[in-house]
Each structure stands twice: as structure tokens, then as C-alpha cells.
């Protein structure tokens, strides 16, 4: 299972999603990147999370966000090639982003990643 499918299986409803942090204490809610990497807020540091912000799955997700919601990515100043994780975080945390939007981009990114295999 790739990281996008992991996120899809983790973010099963609005009650499992959060903004402005990777996850809530106890790992009951996650942002997009937090769900992809299984980040638990009880971890002591980034080194323990084993996060690859340049992973192909992060780039695919950033590409979908750029296609679907360009106005929500880094205030329009990010490049998919260089700033994929920043695009994902800025979309997740944007004031207009809802769980339905997150669900939509995850579905499209999962399909797109399977087409690349």
C-alpha cells in the first residue's frame, strides 16, 4: 500500500481530519501529511517520524492540488517541482479547505498514482 492509500484509509471522515498540525494527541485526527506518514502527536521529534517530504506520493498529491485548487497553494507562490510538501500543507490548512476537498484530492491522487505504476 502506498502512502496515499494509507492516508485514504486513515482519513475516513471529517472526524479523522485536522488542520494546523500533523495530528492530535493520541493520533485520532491527522492532516494530509500526518495521515500519509502515520504521524502521532506524541512523537518527540521529526526524526522519529521518518517523513520523506520529497516522496513521489507527496508530489502527486501536490499536482492534484495545483490542478484542483491553485488558489489554496502557498498563496500562488509555490512550484510543484520544488515545494510539494509546502503545497500540501498550505492546502490542508487553508481556511476554505473542508474535509470534502481533502477527500476529493486524495481520491484523485490515489487514481493518478496508480496510473503512474
Image (cartoon, helix red, strand yellow):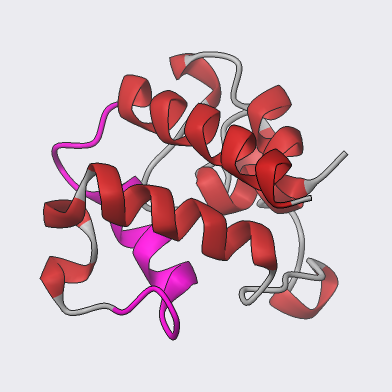
Where does the image place residue 15, in percent across and percent down from the top left?
Answer: 49, 16
State left or right for residue 40 relative to residue 14: right
Q: Quadrant of the N terminus?
A: top right
Viewer can see residue 109? yes
Where does the image place residue 102, in percent across and percent down from the top left?
Answer: 40, 32
State left or right for residue 71 relative to residue 37: left
In the image, residue 25 sits, relative to residue 41, either above or below, namely above
Q: Residue at x 52, y 34 (%)?
A: 106
In the image, residue 114 sits, relative to residue 15, either above or below, namely below
* Residue reaching furthest to the right: 1
Q: Residue at x 41, y 79 (%)?
A: 83
In the image, residue 78 sits, relative to residue 91, either above or below, namely below
Where does the image place residue 43, in percent across and percent down from the top left?
Answer: 76, 60
Which of the 4 image quadrants contains residue 98?
A: top left
Where does the image place residue 23, in percent across and percent down from the top left?
Answer: 58, 45
In the image, residue 95 sits, relative to residue 116, either above or below, namely above
Between 95 and 87, the residue placed more toward the observer is 87
Residue 31 magenta-highlighted:
no
Q: Residue at x 72, y 40 (%)?
A: 114
Q: Residue at x 34, y 20 (%)?
A: 100
Residue 89 magenta-highlighted:
yes
* Residue reaching furthest to the bottom: 82
The part of the chain drawn in magenta is 79-98
Amino acid at each position: 500500500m502506498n502512502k496515499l492509500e494509507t492516508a485514504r484509509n486513515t482519513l475516513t471522515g471529517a472526524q479523522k481530519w485536522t488542520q494546523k498540525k500533523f495530528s492530535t494527541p493520541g493520533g485520532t485526527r491527522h492532516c494530509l501529511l500526518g495521515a500519509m506518514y502515520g504521524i502521532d502527536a506524541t512523537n518527540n521529534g521529526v526524526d522519529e517520524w521518518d517523513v520523506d517530504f520529497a516522496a513521489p506520493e507527496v508530489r502527486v498529491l501536490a499536482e492534484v492540488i495545483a490542478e484542483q485548487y491553485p488558489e489554496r497553494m502557498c498563496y500562488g507562490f509555490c512550484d510543484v517541482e520544488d515545494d510539494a510538501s509546502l503545497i500540501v500543507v498550505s492546502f490542508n490548512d487553508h481556511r476554505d479547505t473542508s474535509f470534502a476537498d481533502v477527500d476529493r484530492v486524495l481520491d484523485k491522487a490515489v487514481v493518478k498514482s496508480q496510473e503512474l505504476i
